[in-house]
Image: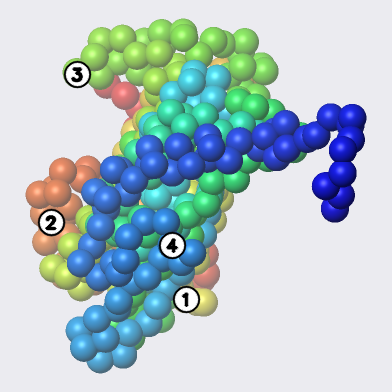
Amino acid sequence: MSSGTTTQKTISYQSAGVDIDAGDRAVEALKPSIRKTTRPEVVGGIGGFAGLFALDTEKYKKPLLASSTDGVGTKLVIAQKLDIHDTVGIDLVAMVVDDLVVCGAEPLFLLDYIATGQVVPEKIADIGAGIADGCRYAGCSLIGGEIAEHPGVMKPDDYDISATGVGVVEADELLGPERVKPGDVAIAMRASGLHSNGFSLVRQALFGVGGLDLGAVIPEFATAERNQRTLGEELLTPTHIYAKDCLELAKECDVHAFAHITGGGLAGNLVRSLPEGLQIEVDRGTWTPNPVFDVVQRTGGVSLEEMERTFNMGVGMVAIVAPDQVDRSLAVLTARHVEAWTIGEVTGGGSGVRLAGDYLTAG
């Protein structure tokens, strides 16, 4: 390192594409949202090298820590094209905490990672506000994270987000395939839409094949509250967060297992909650998929088989409960404003999940 006089132009981290000051401003912009997620167990403030969480070990006889990590996938392309960034953070939290709750774990805290080609503090604040909203809906704390600027790797307007969450469950209250028995009943919980899976197929079907525009008003997307909704608005509908719904259901009823319906669809995820030698035949005739699925299938010419192995088809979470708990379970979910219905029964004589019958049609 020379301190001598030189005529060579000096360079800096900022001239290389990384703006440290912008990163600091982004962190400051995030702090109000992060503070809203604080739980009593969080130790210390924002800005440390590690997030600290004091687990109340006296509350549990034998606590098991559960962890999950995920992202949002190419749904981010839609957010970036529309320049709307305050909803995908909710999707991110949902993908993580609803995996945790499947085993009965209460989500405790989450750490996020935001990578972008150029740090724009206002955009980072919008993303972070969505993540904080998701954490509040799930009842967990956002205790740390990272904002990384990647010039030369990502375009200035591009970003990707991921998160890791940690939860806790009492060992003897752990849910899963081991608890499932013949005669148990599968209860579906309505999805808010596509959630955060299959967007590469969605984009190919709607934009590549269908030639649609994000601003197009699609009649099927009209609701009781709004008689006009655009394609972009529908695609950015946040993933429903089921964490508190599932925890309350497990507290009030005899729940044996949950299945978070993400990539792989109903069959691909529900089978993960079944032990070997047991099966469920799902009755398609018990519900009508959200309109967006019909639009994707019709516009893109996608086969039903491909739709069902890619999308949730209107079911975001499934609870497997004891047969004498069905009515009570439906009542608990209804009280929490979650649309729910029975879709099948666990039986012996085979293994896996089979979808039978035809979906109900709207109207």
Which of discs 4 and 1 lies nearer the camera? The answer is 4
Q: Residue 48 carries which label?
A: 4
Question: How far, Cα to Cα, is label 4 from label 3?
Answer: 46 Å
Which mark sits nearer the N-terminus, 4 or 3? 4
Q: Position of residue 65 (x, y in %)?
A: 40, 77
Q: In which quarter of the image is the C terminus?
A: top left
**Mark 2 highlights which residue?**
332
Q: What residue type is labelled 4?
A: Gly
Q: In this view, does 42 lie above or below 296?
A: below
Extreme residue in the front direction: 5
Q: Distance between the residues labelled 4 and 1?
A: 43 Å
Q: Which residue is drawn at 43% across and 44% down?
A: 27
Rendering coords of residue 248 (x, y %): 18, 62
Considering the numbered disc 2 on the image, is that residue within a helix, a strand or a loop? helix
Q: Disc 2 to disc 4, how far (Cα)?
A: 40 Å
In the image, taking residue 155 as reference, residue 325 lies left or right, namely: left
Residue 184 is labelled as none
Inspect the image, locate mark 2, and give the three-letter code of the amino acid beneath it: Val
Secondary structure found at label 4? loop
The residue at 32%/60% (across/down) is 45
Q: Distance between the residues labelled 2 and 3?
A: 24 Å
Lateral position of residue 95 relative to residue 249, left or right: right
Q: Going from the N terminus, do you reach mark 2 or mark 1 first?
A: 1
Q: What residue type is labelled 1?
A: Pro
Left or right relative to 100: residue 8: right
Disc number lying in front (1 or 3): 3
Q: Disc 1 marks which residue? A: 275
Direction right: furthest residue: 7
